[in-house]
Amino acid sequence: MPELEDPLEIGGVELPNRLYRAPLLECAGEGSDAADRLRSELEPAAESGAGLVFQGAAPVRESGGRVAPSMTGFADDEFVAGLSELTDAVHDHGGRIFVQLDHGGLRSLEAWHAEYRRANPDLRQLAVSRPPWPLRLLDRLGFLHFDARVLTTAEVYDLAADFGRAAARAADAGYDGIHLAGANMGMLQQFLSPFYNRRDDEFADGVRFLELVHDEIRERAGDLPLVVKVPAETETPPFVRRRLSADDAVEICERLGRVGYDAVAPVRVSTFWDMSIVRGEFPERAWRDERFREGYAAAFGSRWRAALVAAANRAEAVVYDFDAAWNADLARRVRERVSIPVLLEGGIRTREQIDELLGDSSGGDTGISPACDAVGMGRPFYAEPRLPARLLREERGQRGELEREGAYER
């Protein structure tokens, strides 16, 4: 069975080991300092040994489709070319860097961020189909704002081409591969999900859109490795009847492998942007710290609305409690059915967990097949930017010795 330190090939690119920094929202903006800000966020992971670093969601269009303020878009040739200093820095440490491409669709800022909506009154959300009834209800109640334009068939082709153009810019800037944000209520999940997709054209089968995006990227960016996150909507509230099951997600992964995707990252999510993504309690200081409160008020329209969102987050945290390696069972099912690497993230915290997920059980036969080919962490990097230096030094039987030597940076 592979070990964490063993190399892994994804689409012809060899990673020096099987530990990766999962995509997060760096929100480095698009100013002259964006490359420096991204470098300060991402380089420590590569410098400390992560084999692969994913740069978080990058919008593929100049306007619209952003899911958070200050995102770093990939729609401008000159700007993206300037990010080559980031890719060079990662390569200097022997690591690889992929960028995650995204479009928010109904989850975009123009739906939920009050201040952004006031500053961009002409922006409308792009939708796969008419927004589902729960979103329309929240619109009528004033918590969200939907003025969605359903994409025509021709506009779907245009959007796929924008993914291809963004990938070409990434290739020119030295990125080693592309990650598609196929979950967390983004546009790609909206195409895949029967909750959102009620089209009557060729894209009624949402995998068809991912096929088209694959073809556009291959045509414009060559054989750049292509990874996609695939959702199983198993965490959806019971009042939602149309959703992607775990069986659906496994089948989608199989189809995407046949299409030519180079790796998949299966995840259990909801149809909504809720605490199922985070699992566990939202940090209390994030709601109490005055530095954040003005931002919440700007986003949600007032302090009392922000307080309602905070209360909803606390309630959801009870329902979506922390669950170690919560995507492992789904990933294991996918790995048994596909011939491409399977990436696993979500609730992974220790080297012992990692070894078990990769199938390395200290020589013992557990009877459980490996869950994945590579393991990723996201939020732990916020607390410990040089996390790989610790995890990659952890060898079985040596943990206590390393701790006595002070090797662990907490």
Image (cartoon, helix red, strand yellow):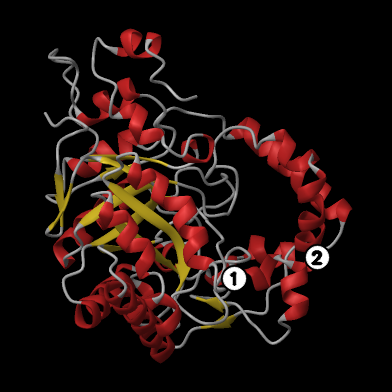
Mark 1 lies on a secondary structure that is loop
Give me the disc on residue 131. Answer: 1
Relative to 247, 323 lies left or right:
right
Give me the disc on residue 9. Answer: none
Residue bearing mark 2: 142
Name the foreground residue: 4 vs 269.
Answer: 4
Q: Quadrant location of residue 348? A: top left
Dots 2, 1 in contact, CB < 8 A: no
Residue 87 shows in this picture: yes
Q: Residues within 10 Å of mark 1 (few under 14, many from 20)?
A: many
Counting from the top left corner in percent of width and height, residue 113 is at 71, 66
Q: Residues within 10 Å of mark 2 (few under 14, many from 20)?
A: few
Counting from the top left corner in percent of width and height, residue 59 is at 48, 72
Amino acid type at mark 2? Gly
Q: CA distance from mark 2 to mark 1?
A: 15 Å
Amino acid type at mark 1? Pro
Counting from the top left corner in percent of width and height, residue 141 is at 80, 63
